[in-house]
Image: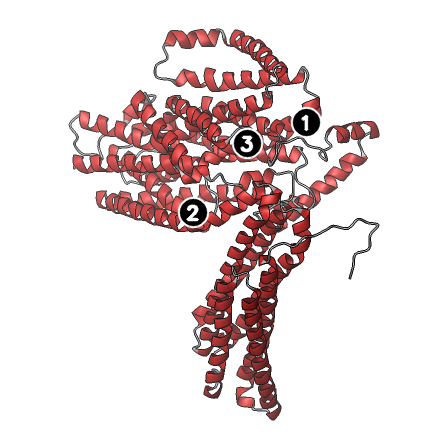
Amino acid sequence: MDFLFLGIIIFLFFLAVFDLWVGVSNDAVNFLTSAVGSKAAPFKRVIIVAAAGVFIGAAMSNGMMDIARHGIFNPANLSFYDVIAIFMAAMVTDIIILDIFNSLGMPTSTTVSLVFELLGASFVVALFKTTAPDSTLQMGDLLNTEKALSVIIGIFLSVAIAFVFGTIVQFLSRLVFTFEYKSRLKWKVGLFGGVACTAIIYFMLLKGIKDLTIMTPEVKAWVDNNTTFILLGSLVVFTLIMQTLHWCRVNVFKVVVMLGTFSLAMAFAGNDLVNFIGVPLTAFASYQDYTAVGGGNPHDFMMVSLLGSARTPLYFLIGAGMIMVLSLATSKKARQVTQTTVGLSSKTQGDEMFGSSRLGRSLVRATLNASSWVSEHTPDSIRHWVNRRMDNTVTQEEDGAAFDLVRGALNLMLASVLIAVGTSMKLPLSTTFVTFMVAMGTSLADRAWGRESAVFRITGVISVIGGWFITAGVAFIGAGLMVCLMHMGGLAMMLVGGVVAIALLIRSNIRFQNKEKDAPSETLFQTILTTQPTEAWPLLKIYINEKQKMFLNFAAECFSDITEGFIKEKRKLLFRSEKALMTEKNVLKGQRRKLTLCMRRVTPEIAMEKRTWFHLSNNMAMSMTYNLRRINEACKEHVDNNFRPLPEEFHNTFLSLCNDIKDVIVASEAAIDDSHPEIIDKLRTRCNEIKDELSFHIRGIYELLQQGDTDNMAVTYVYLNILQESQEFVTSLRKMLRASGKLNLAPSTYRSFSHNESIPA
């Protein structure tokens, strides 16, 4: 039986390596966003600095291993089998949650999931123990309730504390530096850099270095006794260094951003490493203790040894750090930095990735009312002074940056400090949400959320936090159910859970590869936003053509499904089309925002010439979607009520019309990239011919209705609706073809007119 447990331990290490690779790839945005968003340095340089921080932070994470050993449960009253079941259930559940949340596109947190998985599994095992007939144990004897409660409260409070601190510190810093900070530095920048560097040194080195396995008690004692002296010395030295750098025309804020990137990457590795290797290392230590006494019954060997602190060998930590660095340097996910935090923090209204919610609207309304009340009760002199210092109409961010270096520096410094405090207190804070909430707080203080974007930004924050709560609940319940199955099913059920986890890993990898097919389009979008105006239009034309072809392909498939579902009375096709059309509506709204952003990057001359056709193309796509929704709604209601099917005498005519419409859609998709106007003209002529055919058949249906055939009245009305909406659909397609032809033509010489000139008709 011992070799089966050894296989489980090896499997746990395999999952840990996977978590290390994927976790760093997904969470790299936590410590890259501020540096990339503020354009503090080239991306490769940012990656090198972050990789160094990750590697050093991994070596400082030894103290966090105690959470998995005895932070959630009391191992003295748990057997070796109980502990292995808890760890196996937690890791398998973690893989399942990662697969489900990735499939749904919902945010999640590795820290939150692991803590609540351990808590849920431990709680169920405690129930089995306390309800046993001959048991004298209480729940408090099995669960480390005090420590578990402090861990949970630490995670909960970290979100609120990060947002509040981010708002207050950014507000005070902006009052000091203003948005025109480059002309107001003088002596301020040296002190700011000194304080920032001192905070990083204290929290990231003095706190983190205590957990290094190579530290001797003498060195630790010296650090404790001389902390104040070290801090004061660091403040003076770094202040002088930063002031000297400023006099040498070095941008101190860029230096602080890079130091902050290093410190936050180190905090991420030091705090989140427990999520990836804490469980398998504890399981391995338990197996070593179990085999050291010769094995035996795994249900009788109690894990008293886990009460001691973890002393993880340095080579394990270095190996984990190397895997994390390799993932950061080579992963495509890490290179394609997500725009979620940047988009929600940007000072301009841009591609809002989240919609509007009732709670978001209520919070915006309440905030506006509170702001008006504060403004009314604030003295005029103070209000004018604050407004003058907080005037964001003139900013000095780098070219193409989403925010300036002042905010970028504070984002990194505050997040790294808060995470380092949690690490030093052995609290597994969620670096994902601490970083995210700090960025949200600083953007709020910077007045980056305007009236037109606030509801979308707040909805985004609510969505992320909501995903955090869902993660906690699902992790607790899922791990509890999983350990229940393993406790009753024995080693066989553990092996089944391992097989399920491997299958889900393979499926997740396949899905990610499929998602990468859409990556070139999004990469092109980001390229357009950062390119020069003179080079933007050729790229934007390619982007518009890709989106138009994707929509026409969708329209052809959806039209085919609806007509087939109506004729053959297939309810599933009609219900599937309804969901697809609702999704496509949101997709088109998002594309319109993205394309509008891209159009702003085009030179004014080309923009004035192409803007009308650009908006006409978008409007026609939305109109065609509405036509399909109205057709599908009538067909779905008719088929769902089991009314009479379409009479046989209409089948041939209807199928012929449907094929004509699908053929012209497919031909239009193929002709989108073609700039020859004669091809577009032929397709538009074909649309007119189809419209005439539809008009002819519509008149025939009116004549049948006039005759009053009551048996087929319901299906005749549905058929009439399909023909009329199809006619409108073809009309919109004809207009889209015209707009596409105009967009694909080379821009003509365009001269803008002054206000005193008359524009010719």
Crowd around label 1: few <14 · some 14–19 · many ≥20 (10 Å): many
Residue 90 x %, y % = 35, 39
Q: Secondary structure at mark 1?
A: helix
Q: Secondary structure at mark 3?
A: helix
Q: Quadrant of the C terminus?
A: bottom right
Question: What residue is pinned by disc 3?
Answer: 34
The image position of residue 286, as x and y in percent, is 26, 29
Q: Splitting the image into 4 quarters, where does residue 365 fall?
A: top right
Which residue extends farthest bottom?
707
Q: Between disc 3 and disc 1, whose residue precedes?
A: 3
Residue at figure coordinates x 83%, y 27% from the top left: 381
Q: Is residue 293 above or below residue 354?
A: above
238 up-or-down from 417: above or below: above
Q: Is residue 436 visible?
A: yes
Q: Callout 2: few (<14), some (14-19), or many (20+) C-alpha neighbours within 10 Å?
A: some
Residue type indicated by callout 2: Asn
Q: Of marks 3 and 2, which one's residue comes earlier in the chain?
A: 3
